[in-house]
Image (spheres, rainbow, N blue to C red):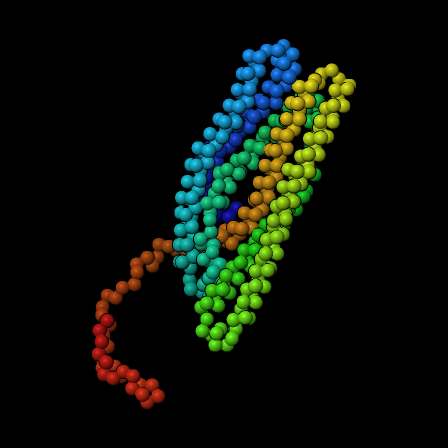
């Protein structure tokens, strides 16, 4: 684990625990809805109990409203915290860089250092505060739903296990590809930005040698390469979303419905309400699995995006030394200084005090 990750995990632990508790609570509440629907369909509707139906509708409406209100308040505080902490860590990184010896700057791209020192660390903080707790709570909720589905019938629960290998294998591949692709984009961007900075810095030389077209073509070539890699990143993200949230979810929802329908033909234990309840639980299960796999994909992006930042945080620097700015303790005296160049006098009997 890198130093940056240790710092972030330590500072976000309190918020992450609160977020995890909130996620678990909201997901447990959401598990009540399918059971409530089954009860209404199998018991309340045949009894024509309008009072219970109205109360159930109010419960259905109040649960998401309460969830949205609490989540909005929590998101506000986490965003403010992440923004402040992100700025604090950015200053720490700038201090580490600026206190490096001069030879460090001879071997490092100045524009890349500028980019990394100004990178939005608040996004990484929010990932640890919000996404990681959601990731673990989704795992816990998935296990609970699996047990519930097995309680209806073992075949229904065991069938859901097939969802995992069919999703994990492509997601693992996409995770590794995204990490390398994003890192590649950042390196190309840094080199291209350095080329632009050098071009404007040496504009006199470039114009005197008619190199404008050459530099523009180089920048255009680099931009084309960056766009090509970003296209691969976008396609990988899209593939992950379509595969899990589109194809796999639709496929397993339909197959689960078919399995329940077949089981109803051979057992009286399952009812119409059971079908609705099972399908609802399956949809919840697939949404939690999508959260798990999409977090894995995002983790790959962040690992690629902040690879260089993590390396810079590992730099050793003694910030406690050389903290006093340079100042002259005594005046510098020039007395009757003479200087000439190619027999041309430049300075003659110069007397000066600084």
**Where is residue 60 shown, x and y percent of the image?**
55, 22
**Where is residue 164 shown, x and y percent of the image?**
67, 36
Give the residue drawn at x 47%, y 64%: 197
Name the residue nearer the viewer: 86 or 337: 86
Q: Quadrant of residue 44?
A: top right
* Left or right: 329, with 25 as reference point: left
Give the residue drawn at x 50%, y 27%: 65
Residue 105 visible: yes
Give the residue drawn at x 42%, y 44%: 83
Q: Is residue 247 above or below residue 201?
A: above
* Left or right: 337, with 296 as reference point: left
**Where is residue 153 shown, x and y percent of the image?**
70, 22
**The C terminus - image quarter:** bottom left
Residue furthest to the bottom in view is 343
Residue 25 visible: no
Name the residue nearer the viewer: 170 or 237: 237
Give the residue drawn at x 57%, y 55%: 185
């Amino acid at each position: 684990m890198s130093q940056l990750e240790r710092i972030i995990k330590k500072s976000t632990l309190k918020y992450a625990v609160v977020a995890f508790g909130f996620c678990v609570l909201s997901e447990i509440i959401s598990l009540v809805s399918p059971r409530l629907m089954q009860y209404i369909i199998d018991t309340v509707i045949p009894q024509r109990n309008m009072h219970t139906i109205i109360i159930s509708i109010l419960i259905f409406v109040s649960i998401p409203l309460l969830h949205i209100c609490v989540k909005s308040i929590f998101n506000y505080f986490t965003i403010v915290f992440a923004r402040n902490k992100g700025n604090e860590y950015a200053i720490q990184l700038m201090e580490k860089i600026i206190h490096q010896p001069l030879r460090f700057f001879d071997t490092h791209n100045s524009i890349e250092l500028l980019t990394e020192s100004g990178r939005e660390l608040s996004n990484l903080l929010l990932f640890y505060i919000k996404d990681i707790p959601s990731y673990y709570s989704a795992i816990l909720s998935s296990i609970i739903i699996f047990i519930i589905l097995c309680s209806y019938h073992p075949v229904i629960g065991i069938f859901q296990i097939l969802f995992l290998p069919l999703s994990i294998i492509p997601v693992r591949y996409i995770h590794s590809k995204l990490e390398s692709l994003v890192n590649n984009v950042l390196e190309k961007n840094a080199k291209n930005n350095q080329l632009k900075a050098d071009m404007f810095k040496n504009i006199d030389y470039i114009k005197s040698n008619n190199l404008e077209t050459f530099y523009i073509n180089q920048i255009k070539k680099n931009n084309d390469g960056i766009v090509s890699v970003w296209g691969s990143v976008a396609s990988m993200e899209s593939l992950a979303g379509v595969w899990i949230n589109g194809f796999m979810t639709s496929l397993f929802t339909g197959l689960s419905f078919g399995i329940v329908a077949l089981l109803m033909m051979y057992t009286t234990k399952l009812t119409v309400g059971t079908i609705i309840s099972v399908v609802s639980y399956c949809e919840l299960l697939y949404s939690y699995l999508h959260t798990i796999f999409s977090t894995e994909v995002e983790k790959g992006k962040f690992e690629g995006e902040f690879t260089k930042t993590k390396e810079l945080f590992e730099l050793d620097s003694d910030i406690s030394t050389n903290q006093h700015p340079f100042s002259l303790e005594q005046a510098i005296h020039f007395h009757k200084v003479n200087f000439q160049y190619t027999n041309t006098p430049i300075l003659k009997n110069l007397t000066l005090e600084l």
